[in-house]
Image (tube, grey):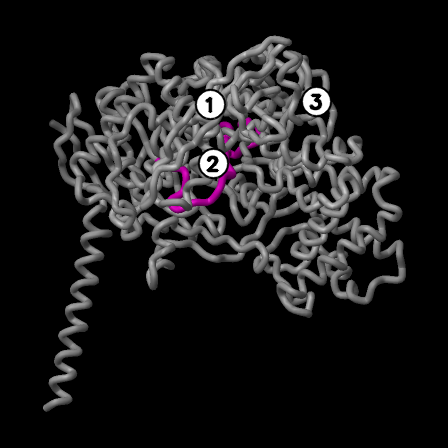
Amino acid sequence: MHVDRIFRVINILLGIMTISVLVAVYWFFWRPLPESAGKIDAPVESQVTVTRDGLGVPSIRAANEQDLLFTQGYVTAGERMWQMDGLRRFAAGELAEIIGAAGLEADRESRKLRMRHIAEQIYTELDPKERAQFAAYARGVNHYLETHRGRYSFEFAVLGYDPRPWSVVDSILVGLYMYRNLTTSYPEKLVKRNLSQGADQAKIDFLFPLRAGTEIPPAGDVQPGSNAWAVSGVHTRSGKPLLSNDMHLEYSIPGIWYMTGLEAPGLHAAGVALPGVPGIIVGHNEQIAWGVTNLHFDVQELYLEKLDSATGQYLFQGKAEQALLERELIRVKGKAPVEFRHWITRHGPLVVDNAAEHISLKWTAAQSGNFQFPFVEIDRAKNWGEFTAALTRFPGPGQNFVYADRAGNIGYHATGKLPVRRNYQGGVPVDGSSGEFEWDGYIPFDQLPSAYNPPDGYIVTANQNPFGASYGYAVSGTFAAPYRSGQIRAMLKAKAKLEPGDTLRIQKDVYSEFTHFFAQQLVAAADRKKAMNPALSEAIPLLRSWNGQMDKDAAAPFIATLAFQHFRRAMANAASPGNGSLYETQMSTAAVARLLRERPLGWFADYNEALLKALAEAVDEGRRMQGSVVKKWFYGRYLQLAVNHPVGHQLPVVAHYFDIGPVAMSGGSTTVKQTTARLGPSERFNADLGNWDNSLLNLPIGQSGHVLSRHYKDQWEAYYAGTSFPMKFEHPDVKDKLVLSR
C-alpha cells in the first residue's frame, strides 16, 4: 500500500508537470501565432485579402496603396515583430535596455555613428509620398501591436518588456541598419594604419591595393557579397530572359528577408521584403525582374582632427571651429544608465578619441538629403526607363542593380551617392585641418557604370569592380576579385539554352579558382624543393589530385585553407613585422595571388620555402584539430555553420528546437556559393520572364519567427541541399485566406 501511494503521488506530480509544460507552451509559444485565416477588423478603406501558400508566403491584395502597405506592416509584424524590434534597437543603440551590459559595446558603436540622429534628420527631409508609405506601414505594425497586447512572441516575455509603438523613424533606422552593414569600411582603414606604423609603406600598399583603374580588385574573405546576373532570351530555352540573385549576408534566425506578394492598382510585385520597411526589395512584377549586389564603393572618410578635448576647438583651413559635444544616457537593464559623450566636427563624429589623436568619420549616410526609399516606385516600374528613373533617387548603400523585362531586354546600373574625392591617400586617415581632402559632391547618376542589352547577352555582377581603367573619377572600394564573376560567366556559357534550374545550379557552385591556384602553388613548391618535409607526404598528393571544389567531405580544401591563412600571416609579417595576425581583410586573396604570380624581391628569401613552411604549419594545426591521419580530414568539420536564436539558444533542454546546426558546409569566400561560418546566400531568386510561375525562390530557414510555426524551419532542408521552391505568381497555391475589413 505504501508503494502504491508513492507511485500515485509520483504520477500526480508528473501529470501536474506535464500540464504545466503544456500550458506554458500554449501561453508563450502557441497563443502568439498570428491569424492566417478568417476575418479581422482593421482600419482599412476597403476590404483587403491576404492569401498564404504552402510556405506561409503572404500575397496581399488591396484596393489602394495605403491599405496595401498598412496590411504589409500588419502581416510582417505578426511573423517578425521581435526581429523588427531588434533591428531598430541595434541601429539606434538601444540593446542594453533589454539585454543588459552585454549590449553596451554595440550600443556605443551605434551612438558613435549617431544613427538615431541621422534617422530623425532624414524624417524631416523625406519626400511626402515616401513618408506616407512609411506611415501606412507603421500604422499596420501598430494595429498588430494594439490588437495583440499580452500575446506577443515569447522573446518579449522572456526579456520582460513590451515593444513600443512603431514609427516612421523606426523604419528609417532599419534602412540605415542595412546602409551601415553594407558600407562600413572605416575599421579596415584603422587596421591598415596600424599595420603601417614603422612598416615598409610600399609593402603595405601592396597588401591594400588602391583599387582604382587597372589595379587588381581585392577579394572578399568575410565581407558581405552577392551574385546577380541576367541572360538574354538568345541563351534561354523559353526565348525570354532569365534573372538570378543571391545576396550574401550574415546568417540569423529568422533570416533577414521575408517573402511577400503585393497587389494594388498599378502594382503587382512579389519577392523578398525587409522586415520593418514597405515594398519589395528584390523580385519581379508583371513586366520586369530585378536583383542587387553590393557595390562596395568606399563612402567613408577618416580625418585626423587637430582638436582640444577640453574645449572642443579644432582647426580647419587655418581657422578655429567649435565641435559639438553630445551627451546621451544609455539605459542598461538592471543597472544605472551609462553616460555616452562624444564630439562632432564638421566632418562627423569622432570614432577615435584619446589623448594621442582624434579621428572623425565622414559618411554619405549622414549627409543631408542622402536617404530616399524608391522601392515602391521600383515595384511599379514597367520598363527600363521607369526602372532607372526610380534608381536615380536611390542614394545608398551603393548597389549594382540587374534588370530584365518581358520585352526581352536586360540591363545593369550602379547606384548610390558616390563621393568625388579631391585627393586620395589609400584609405588611411587624412589631415582634417587642411581642407585638401574634402569631397566635391557625388558622381552624377548618368555617369555611373551601366549597360543595356550588351552584345553577348550576359550581365554578371559578383561585387567585382565595374569601373573601367579610363573611368573619369577616382575610384576606391573593397571590390571582389573576379573569381566568382568569372566562374558564373563560364557556367552560363557552358549550356546553349538555359532554364531556371540551371541558374540555381550555378548559385550553389563551390569551385574556388583562388584556392585551387594556391594549392597548385604549394604542390609546385614541393616539386621544386625535392627534399620534402616528411610531415607533408600525405598532404601534397591530396592537393595534387584536388579539382578545386570546396567540398565539405574532402580534406584538400581544409589543407589549402589553413595553409593560405599561415601564408597570409607570413606575408603581412614581411610588410609589418609582428603584426601579421592583424591582416585579415577582404583584399588578402588578391594580394596573395599577385605576390605569388609576380614574386617580387624583398618579401621572402625563398618563396618555395615560405609556401612549404605555411603548409607544414597548416598540417600541424590540422592534426591538432582533426587528428593525425590527414586523408581522414574533412573540410566540413572546419567550416561549421551554427545559426543560433539569440534568446531561444539560452533556454535549457529545448535550445536545439530554436537553432540550426552545427552542420558541415561546402563553399568558401571565393566560390559562387560564397560561404563562411558567418555569412552565406540570404535568399536564392531565379526569375523566368517567359513564365513567372517557373521562377524559383527560397530562404535559408523559413518565413516565420515563431518556433511553433510550421514555417519556422521548413525551407532549411531545401536550402542546405541546394533545391528551391516554385514562385507561383499568376496561379498562386492558396492554402489560407485572411480578410481585413472595417
- Residue 443's place in the image compared with 697, above or below, is above
Establish if 519 lies above or below 411: below
Residue at 24%, 20% in the rendered image:
64
Mark 2 = which residue?
686
Q: Position of residue 617 (x, y in %)?
A: 74, 58
Residue that label 1 marks: 405
Report the Cα–Cα distance between label 2 and label 3.
41 Å
Q: Is residue 581 left or right of residue 360?
A: right
Taking the image as shown, residue 621 lies to the left or right of residue 609, namely left
Q: Are marks 1 and 3 in contact (CB under 8 Å)?
A: no
- Magenta residue span: 230-259
231 in magenta: yes
**What amino acid type is highlighted by mark number 3?**
Gln
Question: What residue is rendered at 30% in x and 20% in y?
Answer: 133
Q: In the rendered image, is residue 87 in sight?
A: no
Q: Nearer the viewer, mark 1 or mark 3?
A: 3
C-alpha span from label 1 to label 3: 42 Å
